[in-house]
Structure formats: structure tokens, C-alpha cells
Amino acid sequence: MQKKEAQFNTVFNSWLRNVYKKTGAYELKQTPDDYISYARLETHQEDALLAVSNGTFVYKISDESIGFKPYDCFCFSNNPAFVVVLYQKSKTFYLITINNWVHFRDKVAKRKSLTEREAKEICTLSVKL
């Protein structure tokens, strides 16, 4: 799964750079099924995305990082933040705002997972690869 995740990250980053070109925070997930468990978004990831979207998030890039370090830290305040889910069967990814993800999971969902049909309903954007 790690290799597939790295491949999706490469494709998604290219899409961000060349097509979407919008500032934001993006947590990438993928699933071979037509659903993804809400538990796949870890608590610290959700908290960080919520801070980006609804407050201020500051992150220091480690001095121990391997390779070229572009700068020391970054700050997002009230910026878009997304959970991006690639459903491998349909080769489609969905950008879902963290606020929509949390609201749907906590107030609407009847399952412990998000189906592709539901992702399509609550997403900001869908992209077919």
C-alpha cells in the first residue's frame, strides 16, 4: 500500500501544481473498496486540518529533515483544508473539506465509513484520473 500511496501523492502533487493551484492543506487517503473508514483519518490529522480551516496552524519543519529544506516553518490561518480520498476502483479522487467530513461523520452518517456515493455528495471537487 505504501508504494501506491506514494504514487497517488506524486500524481496529486502534480495536479495541485499544474491544474488546481490553490493554497490549502490536504490529507491524502485511498481505498481499494467503494468505502473508506472514518478511522483512517487519525485524530492528530483531523485536529491539524481543523486548525488550518477554522483557526491558525503553525508547523516547524524539522532541521533533521532529509534533502532540501525550503524554509523553517509555515502558518495557515483560516485556509481550505481537505481530506482527499482516492477510490481506486473508479480511479476518482474527491476533495472533501474537513468541516464537511466531520459534519457528515458526526451528524449524518449511519455507517462507520464513507461510501464513494456519499463522498460524491459532500465533496467540493471530484477528479477522474
Image (cartoon, helix red, strand yellow):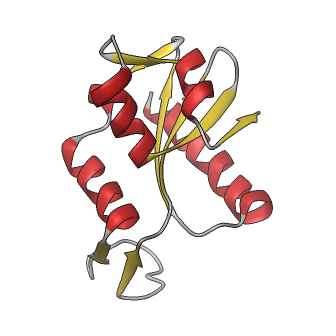
* 103 vs 125, nearest the viewer: 103
Image location (x, y in percent) of residue 76: 40, 75
* 17 vs 78, nearest the viewer: 78
Above or below for 89 versus 28: above
Residue 105: quadrant of the picture: top left
* Residue at 29% across, 64% down: 51
Is residue 2 rendered to the left or right of residue 110? right
Is residue 104 rendered to the left or right of residue 96? left
Q: Quadrant of the C terminus?
A: top right
* Residue at 31% across, 27% down: 107
Residue 67: quadrant of the picture: bottom left
Image location (x, y in percent) of residue 12: 64, 49
- Point out the residue furthest to the front here: 107
Is residue 17 rendered to the left or right of residue 3? right
Q: How many marks?
A: 0
Above or below for 124 versus 30: below
Image location (x, y in percent) of residue 40: 32, 30
- Point out the residue furthest to the left here: 43
Above or below for 39 versus 19: above
Above or below for 41 versus 110: below
Residue 65: quadrant of the picture: bottom left
Q: Quadrant of the N terminus?
A: top left
* Residue at 29% across, 48% down: 46
* 15 vs 121, nearest the viewer: 121
